[in-house]
Amino acid sequence: MIVECPANMRLHDYLLSQDIHILTACGGRGSCGKCAVRVVKGSAAVNPMDRIWFSEAQLQDGWRLGCQVYARETLEVELRV
Ligand code: FES
């Protein structure tokens, strides 16, 4: 499933506003890795928690922790729901 997240929003907040639920076993603290998503269009910053869960190749391919993504621009994001 691919969703378009508007700019200037936390991805997780946007998904909840659309009644879309991703796995967030740790409550969004970045410690479970269950919320993995892939940014397929647009650019999302890599944060330190992403570096714990994903290889450099995965980061280059757009993988991020969905609970940690803040969309500074419109993003297209592939979800595993
Ligand atoms: S919800 Fe656990 S790492 Fe994102």
Image (cartoon, rainbow, N blue to C red):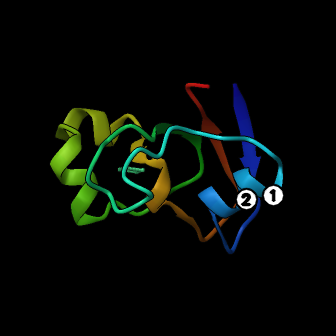
Is residue 74 found left or right of 56 in the rendered image?
right
Mark 2: give few (<14), some (14-19) or many (20+) Cα within 10 Å: some
Give the labeled residue for mark 1.
Answer: 17
Query: Looking at the picture, which amino acid does disc 2 mark?
Result: Tyr
In this view, the residue in front, 4 or 20, is 20
Identified at 22% across, 64% down, the residue is: 48
Secondary structure under the numbered disc 1 in the rendered image = helix
Which numbered circle lies on residue 40?
Answer: none
Identified at 59% across, 31% down, the residue is: 79
Which numbered circle lies on residue 14?
Answer: 2
Identified at 43% across, 59% down, the residue is: 28
Secondary structure under the numbered disc 2 in the rendered image = helix
Quarter occupied by residue 8 = bottom right
Q: Give above or below for 3 relative to 73.
A: above
Identified at 72% across, 68% down, the residue is: 7
Q: Report if the CB atoms under discs 2 and 1 are less than 8 Å apart.
A: yes
Measured as percent of width and height from the top left, residue 77 is found at 62, 40
- Number of numbered discs: 2
In this view, the residue in front, 16 or 7, is 16
Is residue 11 found left or right of 60 in the rendered image?
right
Does the Cβ of the disc 1 residue fall within 8 Å of ligand 1? no
Measured as percent of width and height from the top left, residue 37 is found at 49, 38
Query: Looking at the picture, which amino acid does disc 1 mark?
Result: Ser
Measured as percent of width and height from the top left, residue 14 is found at 73, 59
Task: Tell me the quadrant of the picture where the C terminus can be found.
Answer: top right
Quarter occupied by residue 13 = bottom right
Q: Give above or below for 67 relative to 76.
A: below
